[in-house]
């Protein structure tokens, strides 16, 4: 396949591009116009020559969500996703591209306690839940135009090369790692290897459309997640980070959405379509993510 990728230079995009090439496909990055033919989200413009001969689009681009969340940053987080997805969806229809795999996130579900969340669950409340819902809704033109659209509701992606894990490793390096808040919130996760394999699976399986939870079938409570991280690094996991401190440093909204909310996600669509995880359990997954073994 010839696959056009937005966000191709990012953490997931880089790994996906390499995996596509390794199996004999062509990964085509969609760049900003300043770097040649590409797209300009702010101007609402895309050079359609980049879509010639494309069999599928994987849309991963979006502004970083790192706190603090000022009002202007919140607008940027939302608009980068909605405007970019609206533009790429219209381009997919205009070019006759048959498949659009578009990023989303498990934030769609909001804070749901001990509830088990498969793809049939409704959206939750909060800023990031609203962003995820609007992100998915921005594919309306592609859905109405007959494109097979899948939404990747990605969980926490584990790999020491990027994403959130390297930041979580820092306290453990100086022996002050441990649970976040009370440690009882459910954390859903997936290794980078399984994330990429799952995206390829979604690209290849013509039956898959709509939301797809990209998460291990075995979510864990935060205290168990941090214990596994400590074990993989050869460090104890005994030093809790209080919720009030996180809220003071990051802001209440960001601390809740990124660290304290509970999301117990089940990858029903992946499992029912025959996908097999290479790392379904947190212990071996964390060992692989941290050490590469």
Image: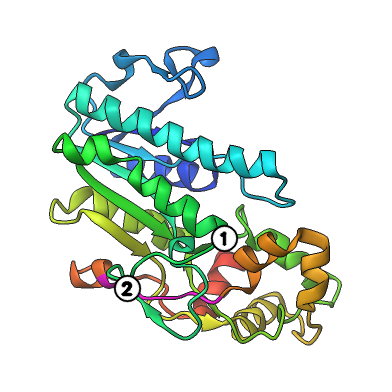
Q: Which residue corresponds to the image point at 78% horizontal and 82% vertical from the top-left? A: 240
x then y, percent, for residue 108: 44, 61
Q: Judging from the image, what secondary structure is the residue with disc 2 in?
A: loop
Region rendered in magenta: 262-268
Task: Give the mark toward the camera: 2 or 1.
Answer: 2
Q: CA distance from mark 2 to mark 1?
A: 24 Å
What colour scheme was applied to this rendering of the protein? Answer: rainbow
Q: Is residue 1 visible?
A: no
Specify the quadrant of the image occupied by residue 215.
Answer: bottom left
Q: Is residue 278 left or right of residue 72?
A: left
Q: Is residue 98 visible?
A: yes
Q: Is residue 190 left or right of residue 4?
A: right
Q: Which residue corresponds to the image point at 45% horizontal and 53% vertical from the top-left? A: 132
Q: Which mark is residue 130?
A: none
Q: Which mark is residue 118?
A: 2
Mark 1 and mark 2 in contact (Cβ < 8 Å)?
A: no
Label 1 belongs to which residue?
159
Q: Quadrant of the N terminus?
A: top left
Specify the quadrant of the image occupied by residue 88.
Answer: top left
- Picture mark count: 2
- Going from the N terminus, do you reach mark 2 or mark 1 first? 2
Q: Quadrant of the C terminus?
A: bottom right
Q: Judging from the image, what secondary structure is the residue with disc 1 in?
A: loop
- In the displayed structure, would residue 115 be above or below residue 10? below
Q: Is residue 128 left or right of residue 84?
A: right
Q: Which residue corresponds to the image point at 36% horizontal and 54% vertical from the top-left? A: 152
The residue carrying pointer 2 sits among few (fewer than 14), some (14 to 19) or many (20 or more) residues within 10 Å by Cα, namely some
- In the displayed structure, would residue 28 be above or below residue 293? above
């Amino acid at each position: 396949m010839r696959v056009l990728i937005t966000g191709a230079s990012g953490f997931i995009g880089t790994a996906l591009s390499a995996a596509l090439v390794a199996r004999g496909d062509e990964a085509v990055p969609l760049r900003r116009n300043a770097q040649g033919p590409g797209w300009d989200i702010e101007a609402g413009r895309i050079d359609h020559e980049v879509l010639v001969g494309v069999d599928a689009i994987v849309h991963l681009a979006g502004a970083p969500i790192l706190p603090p969340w000022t009002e202007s940053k919140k607008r940027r987080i939302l608009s980068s996703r909605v405007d970019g997805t609206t533009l790429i969806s219209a381009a997919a229809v205009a070019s006759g591209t048959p498949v659009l795999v578009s990023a989303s996130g498990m934030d769609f579900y909001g804070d749901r306690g001990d509830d088990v969340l498969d793809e049939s669950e409704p959206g939750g409340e909060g800023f990031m839940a609203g962003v995820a819902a609007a992100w998915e809704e921005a594919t309306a033109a592609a859905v109405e135009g007959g494109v097979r659209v899948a939404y990747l509701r990605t969980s926490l992606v584990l790999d020491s090369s990027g994403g959130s894990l390297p930041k979580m490793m820092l306290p453990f390096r100086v022996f002050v790692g441990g649970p976040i808040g009370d440690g009882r919130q459910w954390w859903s996760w997936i290794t980078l290897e399984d994330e990429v394999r799952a995206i390829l699976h979604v690209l290849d399986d013509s039956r898959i459309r709509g939301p797809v939870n990209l998460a291990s079938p075995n979510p864990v409570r935060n205290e168990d997640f941090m214990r596994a991280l400590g074990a993989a690094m050869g460090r104890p996991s005994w030093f809790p980070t209080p919720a009030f401190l996180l809220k003071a440093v990051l802001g209440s909204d960001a601390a809740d959405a990124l660290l304290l909310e509970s999301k117990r996600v089940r990858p029903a669509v992946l499992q029912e379509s025959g996908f097999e995880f290479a790392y379904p359990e947190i212990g071996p997954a964390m060992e692989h993510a941290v050490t590469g073994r």
